[in-house]
Image (spheres, rainbow, N blue to C red):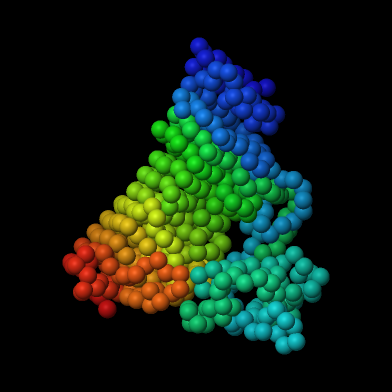
Amino acid sequence: MIHTLFLFCLFVLLNIRSQADFDALPARLDSVLHAEEVPELVEVRIEPGVYFYGERHLDLSWLELPGTRIAITGDNCTLVAKDHGSGYDLGYNYVDLNTLEGEDTWTPVRKAGSWPVPVLFNKGVYKIRCKEPDLSEEEAKDLWLHISQWFVGPFYPVVRIRNGWLYFRKEADPGTPILSELRYGRCLPRYVLCDKPEREGLHACTVTTFLSLSNSRLAGFEMKGLSFLGNATGQYLVWLDGVQADSLAIRDCRFSHLRSIGIKVDRTDGFLLENCLFTGNYNGCVNINEVSRNAVIAGNRFIGNGRMMTNQPLIRCSGVNYHVVGNYIEDFSHSALGLGINYTEKDEYGTSGIVEKNEICQSEAFRKRPMRSLVDAGAIYISTNNTRTVVRNNYIHDIDGPHGNHGIFADDGAVNVTIEGNRIERIRNGRCIDLRKCFSIVRHPETKVSAPNTGNIIRDNVYDGKARIFVRKDDPTSFLGNNGKECE
């Protein structure tokens, strides 16, 4: 059972020692938080073991408890998404409960032998050259093609494989032309095949969200020492939305083999992510939206994430006064960090922040071709619209990809960006810094930027390759100086 300790009505401890305790936690926690006298501290302490959570296992909403702090702490515990026994689904992740590791049901990355070719008299069916064994339509019924297509990687159902041709069906528009790799990358697409697991006894993670904390006022909230293993495609594992608290932190946690984005922070100020490990996740890891202020992402490690070919950065920041500092980021399909907002979005809140003292790289094994990487990307990718974004004193090195994979990429006429004091080395198929001229965005019918390429300061960066840095001479708020080695 859940053990509860009352100490002068100031402290409540809920000890979790079994799955039964864990299943009963939502109701017990709700009872404590809605009691006539709510304590100043409510701590959930999860003892060593493996526990299975259902969809929105903890749903903490509309709490008006400005004098109460909630802490969820773990001691060598692993939280796994439940298996509802609903059969195979492309969006599920599979884990081995004996080893507590994820099971990859995807093939290694392969290069197509051709660009997609439409199949005559078969509307919506295309084919690519491949070296896969033949499969009939019946044998291919659970097989999916995940293929690079410019800055996205759509999934298409496989129809069959015959005589070195893989046939697939285009059922939806992913937002990029099917011949994007030819037009924008001048390279053959990369792909993986996704199938149901061959090994018996794996646990299917069929739910997505562990915690939803929304529209609440608290003295504080903390998650510490928890290890999350696997979930399903969906919104977010942890979703903080409209939370007001004096302190709000996730510390010393591990997130691995997630299919969804790990942490989403909406309309919430003062969030801290510290000393956490993200590894083997398929999508982005943390997303701070533009209505959130003063987020800090410090001292974390991100290794081998972005396993899907998607343009979702591992860390996305479009908030106000964010600070990304002292993180180590290794291996990603598109970008390690995504900053700012698109030129079609209005900068209503003043997106701004500092990114500093981070190390970003790709391992030698990851860079072995064909790579799981998209074209037209950057280790740090900066969108057009910024009120004040500063990227300084970072070390970016050993970045590769099929085409246009840059160190720092300020895209689409980026504004109000400072790039200074960064060291950028061994960018093998892109530029160390690419801040390109792009006046054409002013003609876009939905543009919110009338003066592209303004307010940019680029100085004191050291790099060993090429750079393209456009700074407007007619803009007194821009400055270029003291960069080496080579500018085009």
Would residue 325 be visible to someone looking at this image?
A: no
Would residue 41 be visible to someone looking at this image?
A: yes
Q: Position of residue 211 (x, y in %)?
A: 58, 40
Q: Kindly give the residue lying farthest to the bottom in the view shown.
A: 120
Residue at 77% from the left image edge and 48% from the top image edge:
85
Query: Which corner quadrant of the image does residue 108 belong to?
Result: bottom right
Q: Position of residue 213 (x, y in %)?
A: 55, 38
Quadrant in which the N terminus is drawn:
top right
Query: Which corner quadrant of the image does residue 144 belong to?
Result: bottom right
Q: Kindly give the residue lying farthest to the right in the view shown.
A: 138
Viewer-proximal residue, 455 or 348?
348
Residue at 54% from the left image edge and 65% from the top image edge:
309
Q: Position of residue 366 (x, y in %)?
A: 48, 64
| Image position of 17 with respect to 102: above or below | above
Query: Which corner quadrant of the image does residue 62 belong to?
Result: top right
Q: How many marks?
A: 0
Q: Is residue 322 left or right of residue 122?
A: left
Quadrant in which the C terminus is drawn:
bottom left
Residue at 56% from the left image edge and 81% from the top image edge:
179
Residue at 40% from the left image edge and 55% from the top image edge:
348
Viewer-proximal residue, 462 or 122?
122
| Image position of 234 with respect to 366: above or below | above
Q: Position of residue 104 (x, y in %)?
A: 63, 57
